[in-house]
Structures are given as C-alpha cells and as structure tokens.
Image: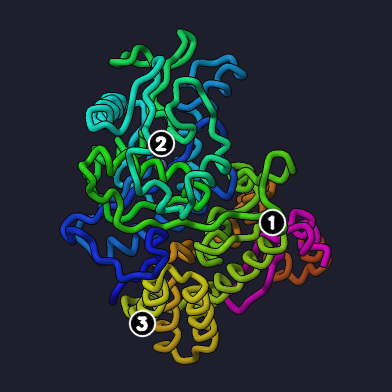
C-alpha cells in the first residue's frame, strides 16, 4: 500500500517516497513552554503522531522529532510576572505538556530536543550562514539576509511585499532589509543569555528548529509538519536557514500543514476570550474523547470545536464502547486484520480520518449485528484492530463508562451502592432498591440490569435530566 501525502510545497498530493527507506525522518514544531497550550495546539501532535504511527508500520527505522521551545520572550515575560526563574516556568509547562499529550494518546516522539540544549549548534549555524554570505552581524544581532535566498516565499506563495506587510516586520536601523529576520539577539543581564562571537545573547525562534533538525535528523529530512499558521514566517525562515547553511540542499522533502481550530465558528483568540485550554478540557472530559474530536475532521480542514461537537463525539464513543461491552463474553482474537486494513487504507490516503471513522462506524454496526459466537468474535476483533490504529477503543469498556472525569464521585462508593441495590432487589425489597437507584442517579450514575447482572455508567447532568 502506498502512503500518499499532500505536500504544501508542491500543493499536490503525492506518493510518499523516503530519501532513505532505512531511516525515515520527520520533524514537527513543538510548543513554546510558557503556559498551558490551547486545544488547537494539540492538533499537530495528535495528527502527526498518527502519521508517525503509520510510517512505523511501513519502515523499520523512523525518527520522529518534536521540539520544546524553552527560550523565548513569552517565557521571559511569564517568569517575570510570576516572579520565578525562567526554568521554573519552562519546567512546569514542559511537564504539563508531556502529561496532557499522554492523556490524548499522542504518539511519543523518538527525540524531544530542547532549544537551550542546542545553543552550540545554533551558534555554529549562524556562523556558517555568515560565512556563506546569507547572514550578517549588526549591533549584537545576527540577521538572515533574505535577499540572499531567491526562493524565499516559495512555501507560502507570498511575494516579498506581502510578507513584509503580513508579518508586520519590525523596521530596525541595524537591518539591511525590513524582511531580514533575527537569528541571534543580544540579552541584557536580567535575561537568559549565552556567550557568542556577537556577545552575550540568545537565539531567535526560527533558527532553533533548523539547528535541532540538522543535529538529530540530518541536512535533508523527509517530512516537516506543523500548523498552517506556522507556514509564514516560521517555516519559510526554517527553509531559508537550512537550505543556505547546507549549500543549497533541500531541507524538507514533504511539508504537511494542519488547519486551524475555530470555536463555535469563530477564530480562537485571547481578545475574544474564547481560548479553550487543553489542560482544563482534560479535567472535564476523557482524553480519548478529545482525541476522537481532534481526529474526526480531515487534518487539512478547519476544525470547529463546540459543546455540541463534544456531545456528539461522546455519543458516538459511548455507542462503540456499548457494542464492545455487549461483546464482553466474545474472545477477541488476532483475526481483526480486515478491520485494520480498511482503516489503514483510509489513513494512507493523506490521513483521511473521516473515511477511517466511517469504516469504524461500519465495523461497530457489523459487531452489533453479529449473531454466532464466531461472528461476534471476528466482528469484535475487527473493531478493536481498526480502533487501535487510530488510538481509540483500547480501554476496557467498563472502565470507559466508569471513568470519573469531570465528576466528583468515588467509584468505589458507587460500586458499593450498586451492589447494595442488587442485594435489595434480590431480597425483593423494592422500596430499598428504588431508593438506592435514585441515590445513584443523583450521583450521576445510571444502572442497567442485564442477564449478566447490573452494569452502570456515569452520565452528564444534562442527560440525567432528560
Ligand atoms: Zn519549527
């Protein structure tokens, strides 16, 4: 099966052919760790983590790198505001990001380079760019000379005039050209800084990705991915730096960009006050539910986040997990290949997750309709295998319904009440069993009696009322 990917650079969907099938490389731009990320920032690690998972099914050695930007003016500002050292901010939010990504089931990168651990590589790249006539030092800064790279703007398809207007570039006296961008800048004593040939300073943002990709993946990488908000200027600048530092050799062979998230149809922004913080969402919803919604739309399309979308996603996942719970007695074997193959075929077509979800829905329908023990086992295996590729449906169905996310109830206490109710029913004390049923309902727990005994699940307050 051929993996096809939409390459932003050529604006076409192409067969993916790695430069060296014995070592396939991918770089995804990671977070700047100064705060909790918003839900939109979770789309690239989930989507491109899924791509890494597919690549690993095709190639024996895939190196997936996703950086941590731990030196940045936003970090400096956050540290100043909180009255703590820079490392206090970066340490806290790097750990929070790692934990939140784990709860989303985002595939863990093979390399997680930190910018501050690559200052020597960054300085070396600046020096090579200066030596090659692509950068210049001025007043403690090092600037990339955009005029030295005729391909500048090719990825984003912008003219130099558009780029200057769009980026609201800083016109500074030390710049030869307003579009020239900072590779290195001077630090005052109160700011983080490192000694360099241009004095004590710190790197600009763009150069760190070029330096870390070079160090861990090589001069030419197979895939570079990120949000389409990074296409300009960040990715355009990465291409300029790396290509010029490497004697004109291609930096990234395939560029992938995901669409942005909107909230109830509006752009998420601080000024509109509708920024949805991932860490807070995870207090209210299971990580798997958020993962489902992040993958539901095709990655290149915009994704509209809303309460309604969350409820619909919850209903779908509840339905699929109900099917799996009804099949609890059917052994799942290793014969789920057909289910996995159809999901894989959809994903190999430029990560067509909507098509993959449609396959899962069909597999769930088939599993619900299965009659004989052999049919039930096969259908369950297929649904589980298809879900596994997408990082879904791998929990014990009982655990899915009993996870106490967004509810303030002790699961053991619920289990005790459910058992008491069952005992009351058995003793034909219906007044007591009804009382316990109502008590459980007040806790947000619905009990259902089945031939195998009672089973229960948490429901949201609005469903309880319905
Ligand atoms: Zn980057």
Tell me the quadrant of ligand 1: top left
Circle nearer the viewer, 2 or 1: 2
Direction from residue 148 to residue 310 in the image, left or right: right
Task: Label 3: state its secondary structure.
Answer: helix
The residue segment tinted magenta is 437-466
Ligand 1 within 8 Å, label 2 CB:
yes
Q: Examine the image and state in which quarter residue 431 appears.
A: bottom right
- Relative height, residue 414 to residue 17 (above, below): above
Instruction: Report, in whole angstroms, how far the alpha carbon at label 3 lies from the one at label 1.
Output: 42 Å
Ligand 1 within 8 Å, label 1 CB:
no
- Relative height, residue 298 to residue 45 (above, below): below
Tell me where residue 269 appears, x and y as whole percent: 67, 43
Foreground residue among 356 and 6:
6
Foreground residue among 360 and 213:
213
Residue holding disc 2: 206
First reached walking from the N terminus: tag 3 or tag 1: 3
First reached walking from the N terminus: tag 2 or tag 3: 2
Residue holding disc 1: 417
In this view of the protein, can residue 381 be seen by the observer?
no
**Residue at 48% of width from left, 69% of height from top?**
353
The label on residue 338 is: 3
- Relative height, residue 401 to residue 74 (above, below): below
- Relative height, residue 268 to residue 186 (above, below): below
């Amino acid at each position: 099966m051929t993996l096809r990917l939409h390459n932003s650079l050529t604006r076409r969907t192409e067969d993916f052919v790695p430069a060296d099938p014995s070592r396939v490389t991918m770089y995804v731009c990671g977070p700047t760790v100064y705060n909790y990320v918003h839900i939109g920032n979770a789309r690239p690690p989930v989507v491109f983590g899924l791509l890494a998972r597919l690549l690993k099914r095709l190639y024996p050695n895939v190196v997936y790198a996703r950086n941590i930007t731990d030196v940045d003016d936003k970090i400096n500002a956050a540290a100043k505001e909180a009255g703590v050292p820079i490392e206090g901010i970066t340490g806290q939010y790097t750990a929070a990001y790692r934990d939140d990504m784990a709860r989303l089931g985002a595939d863990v990168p093979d390399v997680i380079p930190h910018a501050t651990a690559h200052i020597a590589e960054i300085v070396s790249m600046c020096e090579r760019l200066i030596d090659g006539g692509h950068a210049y030092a001025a007043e403690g800064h090092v600037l990339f000379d955009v005029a030295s790279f005729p391909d500048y703007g090719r990825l984003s398809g912008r003219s130099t005039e558009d780029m200057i207007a769009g980026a609201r570039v800083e016109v500074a006296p030390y710049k030869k050209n307003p579009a020239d961008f900072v590779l290195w800048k001077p630090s005052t004593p109160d700011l983080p800084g490192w000694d360099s040939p241009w004095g004590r300073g710190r790197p600009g943002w763009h150069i760190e990705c070029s330096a870390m990709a070079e160090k861990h993946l090589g001069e030419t990488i197979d895939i570079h991915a990120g949000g389409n908000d990074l296409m300009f200027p960040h990715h355009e600048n990465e291409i300029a730096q790396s290509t010029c530092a490497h004697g004109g050799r291609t930096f990234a062979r395939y560029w992938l960009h995901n669409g942005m998230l909107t909230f109830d149809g509006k752009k998420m922004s601080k000024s509109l006050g509708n920024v949805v913080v991932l860490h807070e969402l995870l207090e209210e919803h299971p990580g798997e539910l958020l993962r489902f919604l992040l993958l539901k739309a095709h990655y290149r399309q915009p994704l509209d986040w809303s309460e309604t979308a969350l409820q619909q996603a919850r209903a779908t996942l509840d339905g699929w997990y109900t099917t799996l719970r009804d099949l609890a007695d059917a052994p799942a074997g290793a014969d789920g290949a057909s289910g996995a193959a159809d999901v894989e075929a959809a994903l190999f077509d430029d990560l067509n997750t909507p098509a993959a979800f449609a396959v899962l829905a069909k597999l769930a329908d088939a599993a619900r309709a299965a009659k004989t023990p052999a049919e039930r086992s096969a259908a369950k295996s297929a649904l589980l295998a298809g879900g596994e590729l997408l990082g879904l449906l791998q929990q014990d169905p009982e655990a899915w319904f009993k996870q106490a996310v967004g509810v303030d109830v002790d699961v053991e206490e619920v289990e005790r009440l459910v058992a008491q109710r069952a005992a009351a029913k058995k003793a034909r004390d219906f007044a007591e069993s009804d009382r316990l049923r109502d008590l459980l309902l007040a806790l947000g727990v619905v009990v259902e009696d089945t031939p195998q005994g009672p089973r229960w699940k948490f429901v949201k307050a609005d469903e309880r009322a319905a």
